[in-house]
Amino acid sequence: MIRFASASRRRAAAATRIAAVPLKAPIAAPLVAALLMLGPAGGGHAQDSPPDSIPGAVPAAPPQSASPEAALPDEEVRPAGITYEVDITGVEDDGLRGTLRDASTLVELKDDHPPSLIGLERRADSDRDRLQTALRSAGYYDAKLDIRIEDPAAAGTLPAGGDAPPVKVTVAVTPGPLYHIKTVTVRGAANSTGNSTLPKEVATDNLGLAAGAPAVAQKVLDAESELVGRLTKRGYAFAKASDREVVVDHSDRTMDVAYTVDPGPLTRYGATRIEGLQKVDEDLVRGRLAWKEGQVFDPTATDRARQDIAALQVFDTVRVRMADEPGPDGVTPVIVSVSERKRRFIGGGVTYSTQDGLGANAYWGHRNLFGGAEQLRVGVDVGRVAGSSGGTSSKGNDLPDLRFSVNFRKPDFLAVKQSLVVNFAVVNDQPPAYSRVASELTVKLERPLTDQLTVSYGLTGERGRVRTEDKTYQTSFIGVPLGAAWNGTDNLLNPTSGQRASLQVTPWFPVGGDTESPFTSVLFNGSTYYDLGNDGRYVAAARIGLGSILGTSLSDIPPDHRFYAGGGGSVRGYGFQKAGPRDRYDDPVGGRSLFEIGAELRIKVTESIGIVPFVDAGTVYDSAYPDFSEPLRVGAGLGLRYYTDFGPLRVDVGIPLNPADGDARWQLYLSLGQAF
C-alpha cells in the first residue's frame, strides 16, 4: 500500500491514495516515481487539476493510431494538419529540461500533426498535468507553468498562395524553490504477536535519502528497494515494504518520508523439488545446488545455482525460487523448474579468404548422451576447396585441407564443475609453409576457479608426417598442455567491454620420429575492449599476442609446431602464415617466437550494420624471444559487420602496408565472430 500521511498541526498537506496509471515508454523510468508524489494542497500551481483527477498521476499519451485530436464537424481543418514547434523556457537545468521533454505529449507526438488548432489545444491541455507531475517528481512542488499557442496564420486558416508556417507552442516554466528531505523513518510492521521491531542486523542508514538532499521521487523509491534488498540479502526472503508515507510541508519546503517494512520470518532452505526433467539425471542438477538444507536463505546462492544449472547447456530455461509462502519456522521448500533442450543438433558454416580460398564445415552433436549432460560432437572441416594458394605439388598431395574430429565433454567429472574433455582428430593440412598428415588425441580436465578464470591440464599425443620443399619430418610427440583462460568481457562473440587473456604452456617430449630434443611452447594472447559511448555503438578494441619456444633450435622443431603470423585472425592484409620471413622457395619459414598487436574501432551504423577500421602488425623471429630483428609486417583495412542473434558476420578487407615481394595487394576475409 502506498499512501500520503496527513500533515501535523503546522502542516497543510492533503492525504490521498495513488492508483497505477499507464505511462508511455520513453517517460516511464523518470516519471514512475512521480506516482507517489503529492500535489500541493491549497493551490500554488498555475493550473489546478480537475476535481476528479489524481494528484501526481500521469495520464497516458494517446496512441497515434487513435488520436483524441480528431476534428469536430465545425472545426477549421488544415489538409496536412497543424505543424508546430515546442519551446520550453524558464528551465536552466539540462536534466530537468530533459525530464520535461520526455514527459511532454506535445514533444512526443510532434510529428503526428493534429488536424486543427483545437486538436493542438487538447494536446496542450493533456500536457499540463503531465508536466506538473514531472516537476514534482524532480522536487519542485511550487512550480508554475503556462502553455501558450501562437498561430502565425491568421485565425487558423491557410494564408493565400502558400503553406502555413509552424505554430509556435511555448511552455513557460517557473520551477520555484527545490524541496528537500527533512526526515526519513523506517519502522517494522506489526506481526501476529504485535511485535514491530526490525531485525537488529539490518542497517537502516545510508539509504540515499540524507536530510537536506533534494526531494526527488525516484530516490524515495530507490531507498525502499534498497531497504527490502538488505533484508533479502540477510535471509528474509519474504521481506516487503507494506507502507510508504510521504508528507510534503509547504511551510518550510521539506518532505518527510516514512517506510513500514515487514521482514517476514528468517528463511531457511527446505527440501528441493525439481520439475521438468525428462532425460537428464536428477542427481546432476542437485549436485549444482549451492546450499544445504537448513542453511539460511542467500539470494546470491540461489542465483548461483540457476547459473550453474544453466551452464550444463541442456536446458532452455532454468528457474530457481522459494515456495510462495514461508514454511514453519521459516524453513521453506525450494522449487527448481527446468525445460530441456533438444538433445541432438546439426550445423555448419562457410569461410573464405583470398589466400586460403573457400572452406566449409559441418557437424552433428548430442547434448545429453548418457543422461549426465555429456556432449558429443562429430565434425568435418574442409579447407582450400577453391581459390587458394596453398602447398605446391612437391610438398603437398593436391587434396583440400581435411579435418575429421570427435569431441566429447563430461561435466562434473570427479568434482562439481570439473569437466573431462576428450578430443580426437585426423588431419590433412596444406598451409603455405608445409604439408601435414597426422592424428591427434588429447585428454584433459577443465575447471573454473572463479567466474572469470578457468584452468586446464592433461595429456596429448600426436603422430604424423610433415613435408616442406627441402625436408620430410616424421613426428611423434607426447605433450602436457597446461592452460589458463581469463574472460572478463560482457559477450563471447561480440564483446563491448572488459578484458580477456589466455596462457597456454605445453612441454613436448619426442617418443620416436626425427625429433630428438624436447621443447616447450608458450603462447599468450590478451585483448581489451572499451565502450566509448556506454551504449555499444562505438567500441575500441586492442589485442596482443606473444609466443616463445624454449629448449631447442628452430631447425629441430617440426614446421607444424613453429609460430607463424598473418591471416584473418592474425595480421590482416597478409595471407595465412605470410607475415614473416620466407625461404628460397618463398614459403614461410616460421619462428621460435611471435609478436602481434592489433587495434580496431567497432562502429555501429545501425542496430544490425557496423563498420570496423583496423590496423594490425606482427611477425615471427628465429630467436626464443622477440628481438625485433625482423621488420614488423603492418596491415590496415576496413571491415563490415552484420550483427545477428548468434554473433556478428564479419567481412574484412586488409591491405599490406609494407609487403614483401610477391605479396598480394589486398586480402579478403569472411567469417563468423569478431577478429578478436
Image (spheres, rainbow, N blue to C red):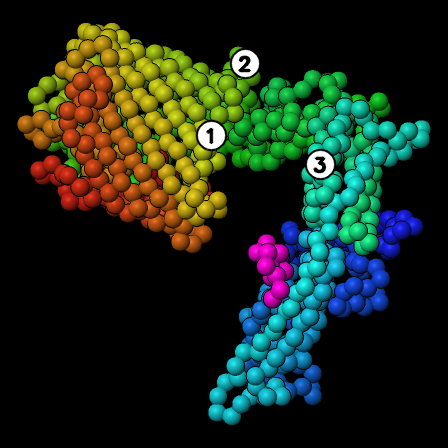
Of residues 561 and 76, the one drawn nearer to the viewer in this rendering: 76
Q: Residue at x 77, y 52 (%)?
A: 253
Of residues 170 and 271, the one drawn nearer to the viewer in this rendering: 170
Instruction: State the image quarter where residue 170 is shown.
Output: bottom right
Q: Is residue 339 left or right of residue 574?
A: right
> 10 Å neighbourhood of mark 1: few (<14), some, or many (≥20)?
some
Q: Quadrant of the C terminus?
A: top left
Q: Which mark is residue 100?
A: none
Q: Tell me if residue 93 is in the magenta stretch.
A: yes
Q: Is residue 621 left or right of residue 203?
A: left
Q: Which residue is mark 1?
A: 488
Q: Which residue is mark 2?
A: 415
**Which stretch did the figure color magenta?**
89-101
Going by the numbered disc 1, the residue's amino acid type is Gly
Q: Give me the C-alpha separation between circle 1 and circle 3.
A: 30 Å
Q: Which type of secondary structure does the marked residue at label 2 adopt?
A: loop
Q: Is residue 361 left or right of residue 65?
A: left
Q: Percent position (x, y) of residue 316? A: 57, 36
Going by the numbered disc 3, the residue's amino acid type is Leu
Q: Name the mark nearer the viewer: 2 or 1.
A: 1
> 10 Å neighbourhood of mark 2: few (<14), some, or many (≥20)?
few
Q: Residue at x 39, y 26 (%)?
A: 501
Q: Residue at x 51, y 92 (%)?
A: 160
Q: Which residue is mark 3?
A: 207
Instruction: State the image quarter where residue 98 is shown.
Output: bottom right
Going by the numbered disc 2, the residue's amino acid type is Ala
The number of callouts visible is: 3
Q: Residue furthest front?
A: 252
Q: Percent position (x, y) of residue 499? A: 42, 31
Q: Earlier in the sequence, mark 1 or mark 3?
A: 3
Q: Percent position (x, y) of residue 428? A: 23, 26
